[in-house]
Image (tube, helix red, strand yellow):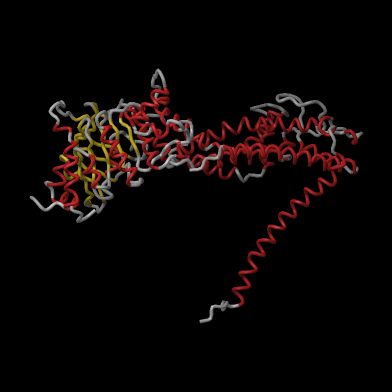
Amino acid sequence: MNTATPTSLQPTVHIAAERDRASDPQRPALAPIMEMKDVSVFYGGYQAVRGVSLPIARNQITAMIGPSGCRKSTILRSLNRMNDPIPGAQVIGRITYHGQDLYAPKVDPIEVRRRIGMVFQKPNPFPKSIYDNVAYGPRVTGMKVASMDDLVEQALRRAALWDEVKDKLKSSALALSGGQQQRLCIARTIAVQPDVILMDEPCSALDPIATAKIEELMYELAFEYTIVIVTHNMQQAARVSNRTAFFTAELDENGERYGRLVEYDETAKIFTNPADKRTEDYIAGRFG
Amino acid sequence: MNLFATRNRRDRAANAVFPALLLLGLSVAVAGLSGMIAWSIIEGAPRLNVSLITNGPSILRPESAGYRPAILGTVYLIGGVVALIVPLGVGAAIYLEEYADKTRWYNLFFELNIQNLAGVPSIVFGILGLAYIARAPLDLGFTLAAGAITIALLVLPTVIIAAREAIRAVPPSIREASLALGATPWQTIWRQVLPASFSGVLTGVILAIARAIGEAAPLLLVGAVVRVSRDPDFFQGAYTTLPVQIFNYSSRAQVEFQQLAAAGIIVMLGLVLLMNSVAAFLRDRYEQKW
């Protein structure tokens, strides 16, 4: 099926295709670093997510898009067991990380979260100094570091924040601007040396300039980490991601809403030639 | 179009009378308080000198009588109370806010009890102290230790309630950020939640101390006597506190003792003012704005 793609999306889709490292002949075959197999999430007796199967490719940016209420954040959070503290939350199905089941009985969620980090929608730096924010993760996880100063500097450099804060590392993190705070949160997450970084609408609380900086940062980070981003902003998904998963909300027999995966493919394909009509309707702005 | 006041007279009168009534109520409260403080200062000022703080009590020679054992007793008592209420109160608040499953019956039972205990008259705690702390099973006798435990139990609900509010005020996003970095729940509480709620917890402790300093009735039941000449000891020997000593002096007929009692009130007010100022300074310095 083929319908006219809104012209505003076409140029941005080319940029995403350019960045698709899958087309780089020197890259090894992309094995999924994480995989969701028929995953459902329940809150108490209520099924919030049904049957999601989704591989997450290594060193790629995977975007999760969809209208409000399709449980994208819930699905993202299940990837690093951040739903555990919620009373009554239960994950059925298999979520593997390097082949290991994340929800197996002996698995320590604390260790899971060290390896699969998360950046939240509203920047949430600790009410401490910039230095202490970045050093917090390594300190609490007991990382053996030769020099904490070096580790902090490296993390801040990787988060493109070093130049702006190098003279005020001891000042309060809360004095930074929104965009800087979010980059600090990214630096803090990187400091514990994760494999995967989950981002839950990281730019929705930021202005366009700060957003652009963070999108640039994501592109750089993907060379070293794997990124999964939930975004409300379709154009952002088109700009930054290699693959896109489109979710939607549906009503079950009892009239209760749940989220399900509709389509998952290379970003270029989702935005130019989606297979499912619902995807096409969402991209074209007919709902959402 | 008439823009001038057309609302009826009754509404306008009520609108003017209401703030006036509020002001009247406030004035009565302030006047009452100022009156009491003024009486103490006027009555007791002539009696103020250093010997008030350094000398022991005396029935026969009120001119040279002092409050020394009472002041020391109060300070020791408050010290003991704070040493007990901080770990117990903050610990209970952490349990109730961070760990307790609120649907379980025993946690609801705790909640109910704490709210209720905050309103129990202090004399009841005195009887409790006499029955179980001064006597068996704790069997501490009539000592400062027994008094401190009794008063600690009395003010503990205040600390728990204030600490819970302070812990609740810490945004969940901070806890999430900490967990997402690989910290354990306890690390999150110890390194983020508690430091951020320090100011609120301190407020609770200040309120508790303010109440504890003035308590006389329960201590009378737990052995605070009115004639102590030696410096107090925590675990043995007789003790007294400022309110008890003031009570004793003020119930005597001679005018010298009335003066002594007023002077004692000034000393006590000074002590309370000092403690509250230090605590308020600490609280402002560490206040967390979100």
Decide which of B9, B86 is in the foreground and name it. Answer: B9
Label total for image: 0
Which residue is depicted at the point 59% across and 39% down?
B283
Residue B62 visible at all: yes
Residue A146 versus residue B154 in the image, above or below: above
Residue B186 visible at all: no
Q: Position of residue B125 (x, y in %)?
A: 66, 39
Q: Is residue A7 left or right of residue A213?
A: left
- Dividing the picture into quadrants, the one containing residue B218 is top right
- Dividing the picture into quadrants, the one containing residue A226 is top left
Q: Residue furthest left?
A: A1
Which residue is depicted at the point 14% across and 27% down?
A29
Q: Position of residue A133 (x, y in %)?
A: 43, 32
Decide which of A210, B122 is in the foreground and name it. Answer: A210
Q: Position of residue A151 (x, y in %)?
A: 38, 24
Which residue is depicted at the point 90% across and 44% down?
B255
Q: Residue furthest top?
A: A146
Q: Position of residue A54 (x, y in %)?
A: 19, 37
Decide which of A78, A13 is in the foreground and name it. Answer: A13
Q: Is residue B52 left or right of residue A32?
A: right
- Dividing the picture into quadrants, the one containing residue B17 is bottom right
Q: Is residue A119 left or right of residue B21?
A: left
Residue A274 versus residue A136 in the image, above or below: below
